[in-house]
Image (tube, rainbow, N blue to C red):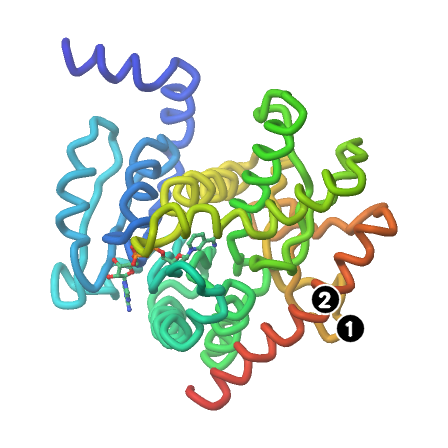
Amino acid sequence: FAARQVTSSVFGAAQRRAFSASAASLSKVAVLGAGGGIGQPLSLLLKLNPRVTELSLFDIRGAPGVAADVGHVNTKSVVTGYEPEQNGGIAAALKGAEIVLIPAGVPRKPGMTRDDLFNTNASIVRDLSKSVAEHCPNANILIISNPVNSTVPITAEVLKKAGVYNPKRLFGVTTLDVVRASRFISQHKGTDPANENIVVIGGHSGETIVPLLSQSGYNLEGQALADYVKRVQFGGDEVVQAKGGAGSATLSMAMAGARFAESLLKAAQGEKGVIEPSFVDSPLFKDQGVTYFSSNVELGPEGVEKIHPIGEVTAHEQKLIDVCVGQLKGNIEKGVKFVAENP
Ligand code: NAI
């Protein structure tokens, strides 16, 4: 009885109905890097999601412990932890996965840019992508590991080499930029952040992050606009500095990652009009040599269903886009070159 009471208070009736509705469609979700700062709370949030029926947690260390812990949460999904030599390793962790979230790799310390992480994280993402190509080539792959602007092209190149690249199923997770942009404008304007959904386009680092405030009907000007844009572009630094060397955003990132996974599952289960911003293989700036770009993406059962155009922008926003496009091109080329030189 006590257990039933807890279940009813954690999940409302609608969510319990959603579970029975989705029980027919089994959804295995894998997290690679599940023992880390993002991986742990992300695993918890996925465990709370009734659309997830199997949760597979992999890390080079610590995942079985996280799995045992999260596995006690009283929702139906089955949780298994994997280390390279445990429970069948990464092959078993990935087999049959519908979604693979990758937050494996090192986070920033104060004073570092995301690009400073390239040397360490590029090879981690390359190797994990090889495993995905081998064991679950049809999964939706959600790249969280930074620098996202380069790690997404790295994964794409690995998948291309393996002959299994599907541009509709590879996503760089930029959701946190939208979450921040929406929260920051609500703080500025005194509105309810739940009602804000600021469009953010470009990439996921510094000046490649471009909030399009005008599309939500806001017209900040002068210093207020400059401060807002800077806060959205460098909001991650606030967290890195406050944590004083202990890492970067983990809790808000976990929320953003779980939201993206939920949107993909909703779309896979037939819900229409599910839109999330994401850094994907995109036609929008291909003529300028930018092969991946983040904009609002409509999700469907096959992954990317429709990439929305940028829409109308102000002259100020256009200037931000120009800077973004210039930087993104270099970030993308760096990822492509890495795989060519270090296959
Ligand atoms: P963390 O260091 O706390 O955790 C990373 C985990 O990855 C560790 O448990 C580590 O053992 C694991 N790992 C390392 N190599 C691995 C491999 N080959 N296979 C499986 N697991 C492996 O770092 P945190 O804070 O969780 O950040 C992870 C990444 O996410 C960083 O690159 C960070 O920059 C990025 N990030 C991305 C954001 C975004 O908006 N896309 C926001 C915040 C962070």
Residue 219: which quarter of the image? top right
Residue 311 image point, x, y percent: 82, 47
The local crowd at label 2, few if under 14, some if 14 to 19, many if 20 or more residues have their Cα within 10 Å, is many
Q: Residue at label 1?
A: 288
Query: Of discs 1 and 2, which sits in the foreground?
Result: 2
Q: Amino acid at mark 2?
A: Val
Query: Front-most of 169 and 327?
Result: 327
> What element does badge 2 sit on?
helix
Disc 1 marks which amino acid? Gln
- Residue 175 is left or right of residue 134, and the answer is right
- Depth check: 126 or 148 in front? 148
Q: Are marks 1 and 2 in contact (CB under 8 Å)?
A: yes
Q: Position of residue 73 (x, y in %)?
A: 20, 30
201 to 281, vertically: above or below: above
At horizontal 55% and vertical 38% (from top left) the residue drawn is 179
Q: Is residue 29 above or below residue 337?
A: above
- Specify the quadrant of the image occupied by residue 218: top right
Q: Is residue 61 above or below residue 336?
A: above
